[in-house]
Amino acid sequence: MFHLSLNYRSHAGIVDCAHTIVELLVKFWPHGIDRMDRERGQVKGDAPIVYQDLPEDFVTTVCFNRCS
């Protein structure tokens, strides 16, 4: 078995954001997940936007409006 350390599907901003979440999981639950080499994104991109204080139905409304 081997692990890919280069992510071909997500840009670096998304991969870096995911890595931050993994670091928090390891910090608070050190034995809760398997440790792997850090992943890298192939394409540089803008950092993801993290929204706060959105209405409860925001995701549902956006999804139904775009998917209809």
Image (spheres, rainbow, N blue to C red):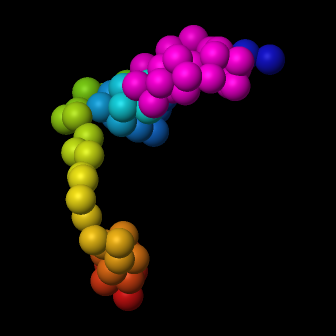
**Residue at the location (19% across, 35% down)?**
46
Q: Position of residue 32 (x, y in %)?
A: 69, 25
Q: Going by the image, does 46 lie left or right of 18?
A: left
**Residue at the location (26% across, 41% down)?**
48
What is the quadrant of the N terminus in the image? top right
Closer-to-camera residue (67/57):
57
Residue furthest to the left: 46
**Residue at the location (22% across, 34% down)?**
47
Q: Going by the image, does 60 lie left or right of 38?
A: left
Magenta region includes residue 26: yes
Q: Going by the image, does 9 lie left or right of 11?
A: right
* Image vertical order of residue 8 relative to residue 57, above or below: above
What is the quadrant of the C terminus in the image? bottom left
Asked whether residue 3 is in view, the answer is no
Task: Using the rendered view, name the quadrant where residue 62 is placed.
Answer: bottom left
Magenta region includes residue 21: yes
Closer-to-camera residue (4/56):
56
Q: How many marks?
A: 0
Residue furthest to the right: 1
Q: Position of residue 37 (x, y in %)?
A: 57, 11
Asked whether residue 23 is in view, the answer is yes
Q: Position of residue 24 (x, y in %)?
A: 47, 24
In this picture, which residue range is highlighted in magenta?
A: 20-41
Task: Using the rendered view, name the quadrant where residue 20 is placed.
Answer: top left
Residue furthest to the bottom: 68
* Image vertical order of residue 53 relative to residue 32, above or below: below
Residue furthest to the top: 37
Task: Using the rendered view, name the quadrant where residue 29 is placed.
Answer: top right
* Image vertical order of residue 67 relative to residue 39, above or below: below
Q: Going by the image, does 24 lie left or right of 29?
A: left
Q: Position of residue 17 (x, y in %)?
A: 36, 31
